[in-house]
Amino acid sequence: MIARPPSVQPGLASFRTKLLIAMMLVVTAVTALALFFSQRNVATNVKRDLEREFQGELAWFHSVQEIRHAALAERCRALARRSRIHAALEDNALDLLYPSARDELVDVMDGGQQESWEPVAHAFHARFYRFLDSRGAVITPRDDRDVGPLRPAEEAQLALRTAPDQPQTGYLRRNAGAAGETVDEVIAMPIISTESGQPVAALVLGFKPIALPAKSATPGMISGIWTQGLLHLPASSEADRAILAKRLTQELAAADHAEHSFPIEVGGSPSLLFYLRLNPGSLFPPAYEVCIYPLTDSLARQQRLLWQFSGAGAVLLLGAFIASHILSRRLSVPVEKLAVDSEENRTQRQRAEAELELTHEELQRSARFSADASHQLKTPVTVLRAGLEELLAGEKLSGEVREEVATLVHQTFRLTSVIEDLLLLSRMDAGRLQLNPAPVDLVHLIAGWLDDLGALPDPLELTLETDYPDAVFIEGEKRYTTLILQNLLENARKYNRPGGRIRIGIKVEDGWAVLVIGNTGAAIPASAQEHIFQRFHRGVIGENLPGHGLGLNLARELARLHRGDLRLARSDADWTEFEARFRLAPPTPATPNRAA
């Protein structure tokens, strides 16, 4: 049993604490977001309910207004068609206009008696009436006892730019600034000439505005009318009216909405102000119905809900803390095991890295030894060959001695070849062999080596078979590509049998040039096939043949250095075949097509 490393304990405790804190942070964040969105949702619902209630009341208000306006319009049209009023206007007998209209409008007027106003919303009694001429100016009556009294400033507000051709609605402030300040609804009905069809005058009547029903409104709600920058809101103080009128004027100047709402403080209490245009498209100054909803009860309800949510959140956090503590202990168990395994793996990795470092150093020393040994051997071998060649050139040697000396000279050449191969391998092992790739015609190199082999004596009488195109350009360095071909072709010749054959073929496929060299002869045993590319390995079939066991290893390393490969494709039934792969050179305008 492997003991747990003591250094892991603090890390595991820290992980468990961090996991617990992370879980608590997640739960706290989720709870806080839930509280925030719940509170905002409650506030949104309250505001939506208030707007729905306000819109419902305004819909009722508009329906009553439309009914009254339709009735008044029909009544006024009937009055305007009275011959006496028409005659006074068309004959320009304006001194007879009001006396003629007195009898016609007696049932509409309430005699100016304010106390006689009917409290019902659909009352049709007018508080005053006036006539406008064709230019929209007010025709002032001589006696206002029967037409309703108006101050000169109030009467001047009834004037329009021109006589209207459609009914117009406006609102008139009366007794402005006084204790009995009121707002009257004004309806201007055009009087159309029977001859020209154009408006020749207008009848203006003033009525008590229809008020929103207090019984259906939200408790504490107050309503009034805003017109000409002033707010008529009797239920509020003068200071509050001034603040509300200023804020409403700013809102309307910033965005001319027909209806809108915004929060505001009234008397130190948060409220919601709704406004709606009462006379859209009218020639009279714009007027707005203004309703103020106190939000004190709504905010108190939201506060209670917030405390309830907070209590529920506290309970949830407590439960989450307990659950997180339990879960963190359970979830940390696999981590503890992983930490132990990781510590063991780390120890093994450090040990493997140390061994790998030692192996690397040994390989470096081996490569340096091979390079140094090769350099050191080249000089004495060269001196030995020169001495033997000088001795061989003498005339005092007998035939047998001369043959022995010639054999020694040949062995010095073999030794030089081994030294050159070892030096090349040591440079590759040390990573110091750099290639300068360029397009190389593989077919041309093969043809050159075949010419060299053809010049040598051939005691085996071998048959040569070739199958390749006129030119195949690969990406490589000519010197080392030639060395690969030399080793493969010499092996195919050396390990062949009398009367055998050598076959050389090149296939081009998917950006690769595949060189296949096969020869007859004894097959390589299956047990030896995996070792043929090892250095200094000589199989059973090559024991009596000259060689030093470096050719195939050197050829494969050079092929891989060219980003290709060399492998034994097959060796059975009197046939052995090697396959070398080279990357094709990219086509360039300077690359010629050459025949083999």
Image (tube, rainbow, N blue to C red):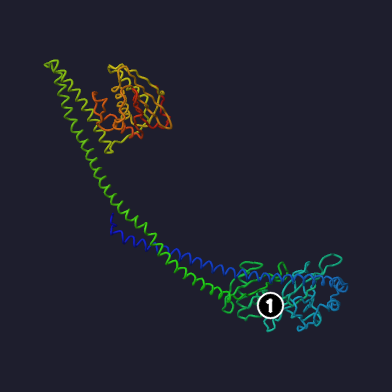
Q: Image quadrant of residue 59?
A: bottom right
Q: With 142 as the anchor, is 283 left or right in this view?
A: left
Coordinates of residue 425 in the picture (x, y in percent): 26, 34
Would you call the spot at circle 1 few (<14 residues within 10 Å), some (14-19), or many (20 or more)? few
Tally the marks. Answer: 1
Q: Nearer the viewer, residue 409 or 102?
A: 409
Coordinates of residue 60 in the picture (x, y in percent): 71, 71
Q: With 153 as the anchor, is 407 left or right in this view?
A: left
Secondary structure under the numbered disc 1 in the rendered image: loop
Coordinates of residue 85 in the picture (x, y in percent): 86, 73
Up-down relation of residue 250 to residue 176 (above or below): above
Q: Is residue 21 among the parts visible in the rendering? A: no
* Residue sitting at x 41%, y 62%: 327
Q: Is residue 273 among the parts visible in the rendering? A: yes
- Residue that badge 1 annotates: 215
Up-down relation of residue 65 to residue 388 (above or below): below
Looking at the figure, which quarter contains the N terminus? bottom left
Q: Image quadrant of residue 50?
A: bottom right
Q: Image quadrant of residue 124?
A: bottom right
Q: Nearer the viewer, residue 69 or 319?
A: 319
